[in-house]
C-alpha cells in the first residue's frame, strides 16, 4: 500500500503546537463546549495510521476517529471514487428518484452480513439514525413496543438512542425527558462478573422475565463486542443462549455492529465470533473510509414490514457516500483486510498482551482484531482506576499517540488502530503508553 505520509511518529513542536493553540482559541469563541475534544491537536492531513497536524507533527492514530478509518486515512482510491461520483450526481433523494449506488450497496450489504436468507437494507446518515430506524422496524414488525439494550451499551446520542445508552454521564445528563418502553438488562462482562456465557445469559433472561415480560419485547439490541462500554467481550455461549431465547419468544435480535463491524475484529461482523446469526444488523463507522453513511440490514420479512414512506430521510444513502462505501468494501475484500485485522491482533497480543503481569494498574488486556481494551484498576483490586486512564491519555497525546477512552467507569484504554498499521508503529506507540504505565508505578 502506498502512503502519502511516511508511517512514523515525528514531533517538531510541543503538543499542542502553536498553530493548534491558536485554533483552540478561535474554537473556544465559536464552537460549543458541548462538542468536547480528547486532545486539542488540529489535524491537517492523514495517511494510513498517521495523522499530521497543522504544525507538521506526525502522530500515531490508535483511534481512527472511533473506528471509522479502518482502511487508513484519506485512502486515495476512496477519494477518487467519491470525486468521480460527486462530478456525476450528488443528490436526488432516493425516495424521490433513485440511483444505482444505493441499490448496489444494499446488494453488497446482503452479501457481507451474516445469514444466507433473503435480506433488505435501508441507508441512512449516521449510526444513531440506523439504530433509531431499527427500533421503528422491529416495533412495526412485531406490533410490540418494548426495546431492550444491554448494560454498558452505547447506541448513539439522539433522544431515542441516548436513552438506550447505559451511562448517564456525559451522554444523558440533564437531557430528558426520554422515551418510554426502553430497558437495560444485565450483560456478560467476564472481567467483572466471572460468569460463564450460559450463566450470564440465564441472569439476563431471568431479569427480562421478572422485570419486563418476554412477550412484551419487540427487539433486543446488542453490541457483540461493546465499544464505548469498554471493549466488553461477552463470554462464549452468551449470545447463542440469548438468540435462542429471542427465537422462542418472537423477539427480534439486532446486532449493533456500528463500531465492531466491517473487518475491524478480523471478521466482516463481530457477531461471527459468537457463532450467532442476528435478524438485523446496523452498520456505520468503518463502512466508507470516513464518509458518513449507515445502514440497517436484515431479514426481508422484518425489513419489509414497514409501509413505504415509513423510513427515509433527505440525505440517507447519499450517492457520494455510497460510492465511497462501495470502494471501501472492494478494497477490504481485495486486500484481505480481514486477515490484516488478524495480523494486528497478533501484533498487539505479542506487544501488550502481558501488561496485566507487568503493570499493577492493568487488570486485563482483551480484544479481537484491531479492537483492544486495557482495563485499568487500582493495584491489587478489580476496582476501576479512571485517574490512571486520564494520566495515560495525557502522556500519550503529548507524545504523539492518540488512543481512546472507554468504559462505564472511564477506566478502559481503548485501541482502535487502522488495520494497515505496521508492527513498527504498534511497537513505538506501545512504548509511549508504557512510559505512562511506568510513571504510574
Ligand atoms: C458510534 C456508535 C453509534 C452511534 O453512531 P453515530 O454515527 O455516532 O450516530 C451507535 N452504536 C455503536 C455501537 C457505536 O459505536
Image (tube, rainbow, N blue to C red):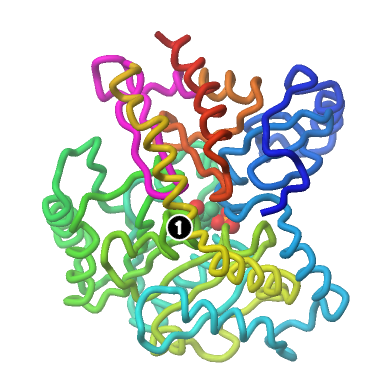
Q: Position of residue 194 (x, y in %)?
A: 16, 38
Find the magenta span and give its range.
360-389
Would residue 155 be visible to someone looking at this image? no
Q: Based on the displayed image, in which of its 4 quarters is residue 51 positioned?
A: top right
Q: Based on the displayed image, in which of its 4 quarters is residue 362 positioned?
A: top left
Residue tagged 1? 339
Which of the image's four quarters has the N terminus? bottom right
Q: Position of residue 217 (x, y in %)?
A: 28, 70
The one of 184 and 340 positioned closer to us in this rendering: 340
Task: Rate crowding at label 1 as few (under 14), some (14 to 19) or many (20 or more) other CA atoms within 10 Å.
Answer: some
Q: Is residue 283 left or right of residue 368?
A: right
Residue 125 part of the magenta segment: no
On screen, residue 176 above or below 361: below
The one of 343 and 184 positioned closer to us in this rendering: 343
Q: Residue at x 67, y 57 (%)?
A: 290
Q: Confirm if mark 1 falls within 8 A of ligand 1.
A: no
Q: Is residue 45 left or right of residue 194?
A: right
The one of 399 and 293 positioned closer to us in this rendering: 399
Q: Residue at x 69, y 68 (%)?
A: 324
On screen, residue 293 above or below 33: below
Q: Position of residue 406 (x, y in %)?
A: 46, 37
Which of the image's four quarters has the C terminus? top left
Q: Based on the displayed image, in which of its 4 quarters is residue 202 positioned?
A: bottom left
Q: Is residue 107 left or right of residue 25?
A: left
The one of 118 and 143 positioned closer to us in this rendering: 118
The kind of secondary structure element at disc 1 is helix
Amino acid at each position: 500500500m502506498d502512503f502519502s505520509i511516511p508511517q512514523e511518529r515525528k514531533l517538531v513542536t510541543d503538543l499542542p503546537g502553536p498553530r493548534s493553540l491558536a485554533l483552540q482559541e478561535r474554537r473556544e469563541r465559536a464552537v460549543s463546549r458541548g462538542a468536547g475534544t480528547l486532545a486539542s491537536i488540529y489535524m491537517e492531513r492523514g495517511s494510513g495510521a498517521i495523522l499530521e497536524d497543522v504544525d507538521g507533527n506526525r502522530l500515531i492514530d490508535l483511534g481512527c476517529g472511533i473506528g471509522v478509518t479502518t482502511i487508513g486515512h484519506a485512502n486515495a482510491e476512496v477519494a477518487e471514487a467519491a470525486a468521480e461520483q460527486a462530478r456525476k450526481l450528488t443528490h436526488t433523494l432516493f425516495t424521490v428518484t433513485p440511483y444505482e449506488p444505493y441499490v448496489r450497496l444494499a446488494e453488497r450489504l446482503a452479501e457481507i452480513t451474516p445469514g444466507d436468507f433473503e435480506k433488505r437494507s435501508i441507508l441512512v446518515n449516521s449510526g444513531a439514525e440506523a439504530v433509531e430506524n431499527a427500533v421503528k422496524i422491529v416495533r412495526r414488525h412485531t406490533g410490540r413496543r418494548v426495546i431492550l439494550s444491554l448494560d454498558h451499551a452505547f447506541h448513539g446520542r439522539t433522544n431515542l438512542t441516548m436513552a438506550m445508552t447505559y451511562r448517564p454521564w456525559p451522554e444523558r445528563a440533564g437531557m430528558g425527558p426520554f422515551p418510554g418502553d426502553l430497558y437495560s438488562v444485565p450483560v456478560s462482562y467476564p472481567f467483572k462478573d466471572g460468569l460463564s456465557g450460559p450463566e450470564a445469559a440465564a441472569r439476563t433472561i431471568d431479569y427480562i422475565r421478572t422485570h419486563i415480560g418476554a412477550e412484551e419485547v419487540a427487539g433486543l439490541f446488542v453490541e457483540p463486542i461493546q465499544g464505548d462500554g469498554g471493549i466488553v467481550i461477552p463470554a462464549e455461549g452468551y449470545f447463542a443462549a440469548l438468540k435462542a431465547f429471542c427465537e422462542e419468544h418472537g423477539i427480534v435480535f439486532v446486532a449493533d455492529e456500528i463500531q465492531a463491524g466491517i473487518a475491524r475484529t478480523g471478521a466482516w461482523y463481530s457477531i461471527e465470533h459468537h457463532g450467532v446469526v442476528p435478524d438485523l444488523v446496523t452498520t456505520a463507522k468503518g463502512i466508507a473510509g470516513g464518509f458518513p453513511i449507515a445502514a440497517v440490514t436484515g431479514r426481508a420479512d422484518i425489513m419489509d414490514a414497514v409501509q413505504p414512506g415509513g423510513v427515509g430521510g433527505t440525505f440517507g444513502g447519499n450517492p457520494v457516500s455510497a460510492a465511497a462505501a462501495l470502494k471501501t468494501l472492494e478494497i477490504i475484500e481485495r486486500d484481505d483486510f480481514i486477515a490484516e485485522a488478524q495480523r494486528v491482533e497478533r501484533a498487539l497480543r505479542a506487544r501488550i498482551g502481558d501488561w496485566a503481569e507487568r503493570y499493577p494498574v492493568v487488570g486485563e488486556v482483551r480484544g479481537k482484531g484491531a479492537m483492544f481494551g486495557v482495563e485499568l484498576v487500582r493495584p491489587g483490586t478489580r476496582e476501576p482506576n479512571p485517574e490512571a486512564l486520564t494520566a495515560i491519555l495525557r502522556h500519550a497525546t503529548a507524545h504523539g499517540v492518540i488512543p481512546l477512552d472507554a468504559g462505564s467507569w472511564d477506566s478502559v484504554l481503548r485501541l482502535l488502530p487502522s488495520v494497515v498499521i505496521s508492527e513498527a508503529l504498534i511497537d513505538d506507540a506501545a512504548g509511549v503508553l508504557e512510559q505512562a504505565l511506568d510513571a504510574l508505578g
